Structures are given as structure tokens and as C-alpha cells.
């Protein structure tokens, strides 16, 4: 069984030391064991949990969703409907963000195209930034 310091756990997991302490503080990570000098000691299970949290954060899951997913992981005999629902909600968020980014891309392309080779007095970039009503899309 692996037993390492918080610094080594950070290096192994890719999670920074202050973030590990934060995860412990908010209950995503159980308080680790302590050695005789009262330093945190992390075991294999702690590293797996940190990797799970890091990966979930990279995918954009919020802390509350991660907490629920960890609870599900700790009780694997449950149906996965809750986990599926959390993933579907995240997918819906991603799809909305993609739509917003595509609208933003179109808006920026229009601004750039409308401002080529002109003077600032005729610049579409400046004009649109000064008046949001001139945007092609309401939300971006």
C-alpha cells in the first residue's frame, strides 16, 4: 500500500497542494491519515479519488455534482440514473455553450469583416462594441 506526503500526492494526481486541502475542507476528500509528525499521509484510494475529482473538474462538473458522483462511486450497487442525469445536464450545458460560442464566432467574423481597410470612424468593431443592439445575436 502506497503512503505518500501531500506534496507527492499533488505531483502524482496533478492536483495542487492548496486544492487538495480545499477538497479536504469541503468534504470531497476525507481527512487523510496523519503520520507521527502529524503530516498528512495519502494512500492509493486517496490518489484514485483525487484523480476522479480532477478528471470531473476538467470535464466541467460543478463541485456539488462531483460530490454526488463520489457518493455514487462509494455505493456501486445503486442504479446509475442519477449519474446519467448529472452527465446529461452537463452535456446540455456544453451544447448551450457551443451554441453561444458559435454565435460569438459569427459576431466577431462580421465585426472583423466590416472593419477591414477602413478608418476607426467607420470601424464596425468599435461601432458594435459601443452599441450592443447592433450585434447579430442577443447572447454571446
Image (cartoon, rainbow, N blue to C red):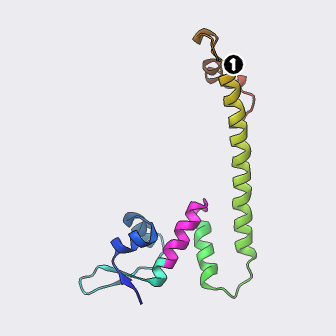
For the question of whether residue 2 can be seen, the reply is: yes
Name the residue that disc number 1 marks: 114
Can you give x and y, in whole percent of width and height, for residue 48 in the image? 51, 78
For the question of whether residue 63 can be seen, the reply is: no
**How many circles with numbers are drawn on the protein?**
1
Q: Quadrant of the N terminus?
A: bottom left
Can you give x and y, in whole percent of width and height, for residue 44 in the image? 46, 83
Query: Is residue 56 highlighted in magenta?
Result: yes
Give whichever of 51, 62 is nearer the camera: 51
**Horizontal arrangement in the rendering, residue 30 relative to residue 118 (left or right):** left
Give whichever of 134, 47 is nearer the camera: 47
Can you give x and y, in whole percent of width and height, for residue 82 in the image? 72, 74
The boundaries of the magenta stretch are 48-63
* The quarter of the displayed image where residue 11 is located: bottom left
Crowding around mark 1 (Cα neighbors within 10 Å: few <14, some 14 to 19, many 20+) is some
Please determine whether, in this image, residue 92 is positioned above or below residue 82: above
Q: Secondary structure at mark 1?
A: loop
* The quarter of the displayed image where residue 89 is located: bottom right
Can you give x and y, in whole percent of width and height, for residue 72 in the image? 64, 79
Please determine whether, in this image, residue 1 is positioned above or below residue 16: below
Please determine whether, in this image, residue 40 is positioned above or below residue 85: below
Question: In the image as oriented, which residue stretches furthest toward the front?
Answer: 117
* The quarter of the displayed image where residue 126 is located: top right
Query: Is residue 38 highlighted in magenta?
Result: no
Q: Quadrant of the C terminus?
A: top right
Amino acid at each position: 500500500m502506497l503512503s505518500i506526503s501531500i506534496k507527492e500526492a499533488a505531483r502524482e494526481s496533478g492536483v495542487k497542494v492548496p486544492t487538495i486541502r480545499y477538497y479536504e475542507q469541503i468534504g470531497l476528500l476525507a481527512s487523510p491519515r496523519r503520520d507521527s509528525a502529524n503530516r498528512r499521509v495519502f494512500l492509493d484510494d486517496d490518489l484514485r479519488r483525487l484523480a476522479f475529482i480532477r478528471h470531473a473538474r476538467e470535464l466541467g462538473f460543478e463541485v456539488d455534482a462531483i460530490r454526488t458522483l463520489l457518493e455514487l462511486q462509494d455505493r456501486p450497487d445503486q442504479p446509475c440514473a442519477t449519474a446519467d442525469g448529472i452527465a446529461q445536464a452537463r452535456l446540455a450545458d456544453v451544447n448551450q455553450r457551443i451554441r453561444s460560442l458559435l454565435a460569438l464566432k459569427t459576431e466577431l467574423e462580421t465585426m472583423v469583416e466590416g472593419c477591414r481597410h477602413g478608418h476607426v470612424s467607420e470601424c464596425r468593431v468599435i461601432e458594435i462594441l459601443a452599441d450592443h443592439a447592433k450585434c447579430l445575436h442577443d447572447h454571446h
